[in-house]
Image (cartoon, rainbow, N blue to C red):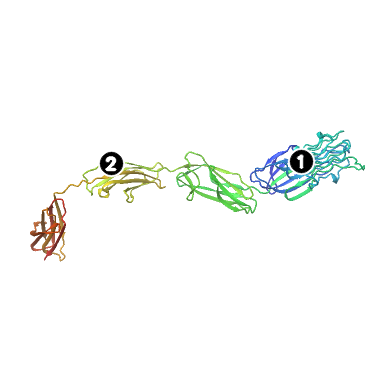
Amino acid sequence: MVVVGKDTQGKTTYTFTVTKTIESWIVPAGVKEVRIKAAGGNAKGGKGAVIEGDFTLVPGESLKVLVGENGKLATARLPSPGAGGTFVIRGTQTPLIVAGGGGGNNGYGSNVKSNAKLIPGTGSGIGGKRTSPDGSTCGDGGGGLIGNGTGYTTTEQAKSFINGGAGGGTNVGGGITGAFGGGGSSNPAGSGGGGGYNGGDGGAYADSGGVNVYGSGGSSYNAGTKTTAVLSDELGSGIVVITALNAAPTIVLSTPNNVTLYENDTFKIDGSALDSDIGDIVNVYFRINGGTTRAIATGISSGAILPYNEQLTFKGGLLYKGATAVTGTLTEGTAHRLEVWSEDNKGGKSTVAERTFYVVPNRAPSLTIDPFESLSDLINVDKVTFSGDSFDLDGNDVVVRYRINTGINTEIHNGPPGRWSFDFPLSKLKDGENTIVIEVTDPYDFKFSKTIKLNKTANLTPLEHSVQRYTIVPPSGSAQGVLLWIQRDADQEVLAEISMTTGTEQEQFVPLEFMNSGPTGESVEDYYRYKADAPAEHIALKISWTGDKPITMISGALLQ
């Protein structure tokens, strides 16, 4: 079982101790650069190896860890078994680091020949041998990475890593079983070899030359960088400590939880990130409702906090960063989720900070138009009136405008929703169909409009009699008479009258004297004259004619 802790520098450690099983360990998210320290088990005869190196791992990959146990102690001067090797393996059998276990002694104390080897040695994961084919005079070899140790029988072989790593079974004639991690078993006449990358050979009381042979320690392997290799000074069993050299960054999110956003509200995403690994590139990210991941801030770690601050605007049911929408439509009554985290350039990732928020989207205003009845018998100076009511469910002020055909918008109401009305002269409508658009807008530019179609139909009735009145202002202040020429249609009858007063009495019109008449093009021109008894300051003409055709031209001169 792995134990997660912190070292003196605050870096996360993952510690494995003897469990007599091969454990699987999934490299955590954010853990990429690590230092692995592996110690093999110690035996009565020799010390286990302590191997250390730096490695680059892949977050999410699986490693296999086997921690070797110490060799059991024999009584009196009997030979002792070998200790187990410690293995950290990638995949099925690719070693990252292996620390050899110590070899057993022959009952006469420690011997440097029984210490674990700090290098792989000869062979590629092979098992250790026995020094004698006679099981009564030698111990068994230790298990390697791939090959089992040699035993007097196959059932007592110390198993390799790929075969489970069990220690050797009881040797013929008694003895002690080997330690977990491929330790070779001992025999009353010989010691066991240690487990390791290559298993150590078993020992015997006396070889063919009559010399005591100690069990050999297992060999070691290191595929890392910045490597070290020493013999253990500890009496305990093996151990594996994996230290995450790259500390995952941390994140602080200051955005409050359960906020509610209304139209044009600002959604502030702020806080700070921290990466204790100076020089790391740190990025802060956010996403909403599991959508697109977006960067908020980036910086190079100096050991100080990296502040971040993102300002989003809620409008039209979406959140915007500037003019860019960063969400789809957010619905009212739904708990929406904000996630913020930080990552560094070495694969480190902080925990994900989450907040819940809600929205109340703005609703467009609306309006109604009072019923409008058809009108007749109007002339262009008469006015047409429209009225109605405006509404806004969010209580916003509104602006109501109208537009006739392609004309400009004219404002008719600005303030709280309610009654509105406007009128315009009939002359603003063209003959035929007219379009009147009435539009209501709220402060957030939400709009609603209605369109009215009006038909203006001309109903022209010929006039039987027309009168036109003119005022003449004498340039010299007064005049005594008038000469007048009138061009008219040949079928018209014209009466020309004049009033000449000093301005103090009421106007009195009298006919001008008709002098003569003659053709001029398609018209007829009449000539009139009038001379008063005395000069007058206020002179008025009144021209009356029959028919529906206009007078073509009027001209004249003043008499002094």
Q: Is residue 22 above or below residue 295?
A: above
The answer to whether residue 503 shows anywhere in this view is no
Q: Is residue 277 above or below residue 208?
A: below
**Residue 471 position within the rendered picture, expressed as x and y whole percent measured from the top left:** 15, 59
Mark 2: give few (<14), some (14-19) or many (20+) Cα within 10 Å.
few
Question: If you read the primary sequence from the N terminus, does the residue marked by circle 1 or circle 2 appear first?
Answer: 1
Could you say which is closer to the camera, residue 357 or residue 93? 93
Give the amino acid type for the residue marked by disc 1 in the picture: Ile
Which residue is the site of mark 2? 372
Mark 1: give few (<14), some (14-19) or many (20+) Cα within 10 Å.
many
Could you say which is closer to the camera, residue 419 or residue 86? 86
Relative placement, left or right, of 403 versus 226 is left
Relative placement, left or right, of 247 versus 297 is right
Foreground disc of the pair 1, 2: 1
> Looking at the figure, which quarter contains the N terminus?
top right
Q: Quadrant of residue 64?
A: top right
The answer to whether residue 227 shows anywhere in this view is yes
Could you say which is closer to the camera, residue 92 or residue 138? 92
**Residue 283 position within the rendered picture, expressed as x and y whole percent measured from the top left:** 59, 50
User: What element does badge 2 sit on?
Assistant: loop
Question: How far is mark 1 from mark 2, CA to CA?
Answer: 98 Å
**Residue 116 position within the rendered picture, expressed as x and y whole percent measured from the top left:** 81, 45
Give the amino acid type for the residue marked by disc 2 in the picture: Phe
User: What element does badge 1 sit on?
Assistant: loop
Residue 146 image label: 1
Relative placement, left or right, of 262 versus 65 is left
